[in-house]
Amino acid sequence: MALSREQIASIASLARLELTPGEFPVYQESLSRIVDFIGALDRADTTGVAPMAHPLPGLSQRLRPDAVTESDRHEAYQQNAPQVAAGLYLVPKVIE
Amino acid sequence: MSDLHRQSVTQLAAGLRARRFSSVELVGACLARIEASQAALNAFVTVTGEPALAAAAQADRLLAAGDGGPLTGVPIAHKDLFCTQGVRTSCGSRMLDNFVSPYDATVVAKLKAAGAISLGKTNMDEFAMGSSNETSFYGPVRNPWNPALVPGGSSGGSAAAVAARLVPGATGTDTGGSIRQPAALCGITGMKATYGRVSRHGMVAFASSLDQAGALAPSAADCALLLREMAGFDERDSTSVDTPVPDYVAALEQPLAGLKIGLLREFFDKGLDPAYERCVREALKVYEGLGAKLTEVSLPSLPLSVPVYYVVAPAECSSNLARFDGVRFGHRCENPRDLNDLYRRSRGEGFGAEVKRRVMTGTYVLSAGYYDAYYLKAQRVRALINADFIRAFKEVDVLMGPTTPTPAFALGAKTADPITMYLNDIYTIGANLAGLPAASVPCGFVQDLPVGLQIVGPHFAEARVLTAAHALQRATDWHTRVPRAYA
């Protein structure tokens, strides 16, 4: 199946990826081929087969007591942030 | 000249305890080898020489006092997707080029607690997405057996570093073959644990239902020692399994006689290089000589493992990599116009071509109208593959076959076509989909390039896989071969 340039633009937009003009034909070509490749799954008869989300069936997610386990290390964590002020992460203005 | 680099993890740990050499001496020798090889191999992204030498001096004090753990003073390296406190953790990506982790991954902390000394972070395919180490932001790693060839991926830096004996052991992760495939291509032993066996806390996530850590080292005995120290329950990983870790080292000498080995019919297919196949069959004959029983088994759904993987892994990766938003850490674009522009350009600039391809593939298969046709369908076929394995392990103790279809290939040979690259993992992906422990063991050479035998076991049968690998390594010396340039 050939994906159109518009479909690539829509996928990139959903994925929040800015593509350069030169990247469009590259991903149009390779994603179309990948979609064809994974289309092979259609051949498998999966009638009545439950989807498997996890490789260890029967294992349930653990719960833990609702207690504080972490100390406040926001200063250490924010050392990796591009822009902070007063302990807050800064981004461009969202609400006009 | 020192021959410390020719010694295994096990030998080095014993030699340090017996004070035949010091950790400072050993770490110094490894650091010199790393530096001397870096231009040719590019196996490391970051080398932490000074802290490593300080830790070695501390290890020597412990050893002099008769203290220390099972790995005290032994140098290792970590794949650069394990978070290391105070040390850049790049994941091979521009996105995390400036990221200094504020904490240690559980694997890093456990190996440190066992006494191992990290010499640095090894190069890898960006976010572990690749089979040749060519997608790294820091440039490709080269194969120590032939620098024109790839080392495999994504743990290519770890594999090359061990193959060139820069370090005696290294950590890796395996989502679709990323430990076993580079171990095979570099002629070393690589072992991936059962899903849930080793904590994923602090391992940068790629595909969370597939990712699992493991060890790369010259021998199975070394992998047993490293894995024993890495494995175990961790409350910080919600999929970590709370069962005791057996002593994989103590289990190694168990007799092999009567072991039922299943040969995976689907792996001896037309895509397998005939000379490669001959080496694998020779190794199987060695097992027969040791008293194992060989039978052929068929896993009819297994040929669909690559298409299943290229739905499930990209879907999970598109979700996991949503955290890289240019806000809290990682790359941020210059002068964003608004929040959406900040997200789009930070991600567009920070991610490389293959990562973008996988994020978009995942976004597509999860998008409205396609979720059932691709993602749910892939999860159903995954269940069929899993059922095939469960059925097979009712008849045999371990499964064996080739690790890869061919030996190492040339740099650039498969970069033009992603599907060709993806098919390099055709024999390794099944174990990830089913969450099984699996190893690759050196079993010969084709035109001076290493060949890997793959051994897959049932869930939590790491000891059985390692014992089988060790038995081959007592009968053969393929795992002791070192590339001439690094002998």
Image (tube, rainbow, N blue to C red):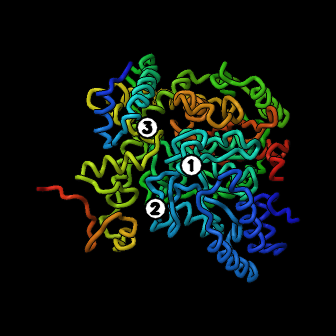
The residue closer to the viewer here, A50 or B481, is B481
Dot 2 lies on which element? loop
Report the residue marked by disc 3. Answer: B358
Report the residue marked by disc 2. Answer: B98
Q: Quadrant of residue A81?
A: bottom left
Name the side, left or right, on which B15 lies relative to A72.
right
Please give the name of the residue rendered at 55% of the width and 58% of the height, measured from the top-left corner: B232
Q: Nearer the viewer, mark 3 or mark 1?
A: 3
What amino acid is found at the position of numbered circle 1 in the picture?
Thr
Please give the name of the residue rendered at 65% of the width and 70% of the height, measured from the top-left corner: B49
Report the residue marked by disc 1. Answer: B173
In this rendering, the answer to whether B405 lies above or below B167 is: above
Q: Residue furthest left?
A: A96
Please give the name of the residue rendered at 71% of the width and 44% of the height, measured from the top-left corner: B143
What amino acid is found at the position of numbered circle 3 in the picture?
Arg
Within 10 Å of disc 3 (Cα), the crowding (few <14, some 14-19, many 20+) is: many
Within 10 Å of disc 1 (Cα), the crowding (few <14, some 14-19, many 20+) is: many
Q: How many marks?
A: 3
Q: Is any atom of residue B480 visible in this view?
A: no
